[in-house]
Amino acid sequence: MNKKKIIVAITGASGSIYAKVLLDKLVVLQDQIDAVGIVMSDNAKDVWKFELGDTSYDNLPFKIYNKNDFFAPFASGSAKYDSMVVCPCSMGTMARIATGISNDLTTRAADVILKERRKLILVTRDTPLSLIHIDNMRTVTLAGGIILPAAPSFYSKPQSFEDLAATVVDRIIDQIGLTQDTYRWSE
């Protein structure tokens, strides 16, 4: 099996639970993964602490890169990372990605993923959307990115906050191309 190299960028948008559940699932799926590189904005750390009440991101078995570390391996296409997930993705981050502004490691890595024609997944979390947001989503989609709104499903009858977030995260995992045991419609 070809193991995946994955970038996870966490922005300051509300929805830290999605990032936490994603990272927890990646820990469980490590046998399918070669590397996970994490980059968090300062706001992401603040929102995580506020929403989840901890700094559990410090305890992950994955390397966290400084938001301005342009020497991180995934700042270059030669490192051959397969996919990048921005979760949650703020509208500001999406706008910078859509317009090619690479002013930090998150936006540089997204630019690299798009130029290399690899998988970029933006887990947007805002509502309602302005026409500017929709146009930026269109631009990212036309460039090869995937807009995966944090829109949980209810047909699996989630029993907890984490279970509800997992209904979105399971779709992210599927998009990355990892094999997982999860609820499937009509199975």
Image (tube, rainbow, N blue to C red):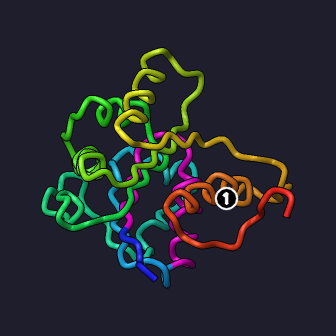
Magenta segment includes 7? yes
Relative to 135, residue 161 above or below = below
Magenta segment includes 58? no
Relative to 67, residue 5 above or below = below
**Quarter where residue 144 is shown:** top left
Farthest-out residue, top = 131
Relative to 186, residue 93 above or below = above
User: Can you say which quadrant of the picture contains the C terminus?
Assistant: bottom right
Image position, residue 30 (x, y; %): 49, 80
Q: Secondary structure at mark 1?
A: helix
User: In the rendered structure, which segment of residues is drawn in magenta?
Assistant: 6-29
Q: How many marks?
A: 1
Image position, residue 87 (x, y; %): 48, 50
Q: Residues within 10 Å of mark 1 (few under 14, many from 20)?
A: many
The reply, left or right, for residue 127 in relation to residue 5 is right
The reply, left or right, for residue 83 in relation to residue 75 is right
Query: Residue at position x 54%, y 61% from top?
Result: 20
Image position, residue 146 (x, y; %): 47, 43
Q: Which residue is mark 1?
A: 166
Image position, residue 172 (x, y; %): 55, 56
Query: Residue at position x 67%, y 58% from top?
Result: 166
Between residues 114 and 23, which one lies in front from this camera angle? 114
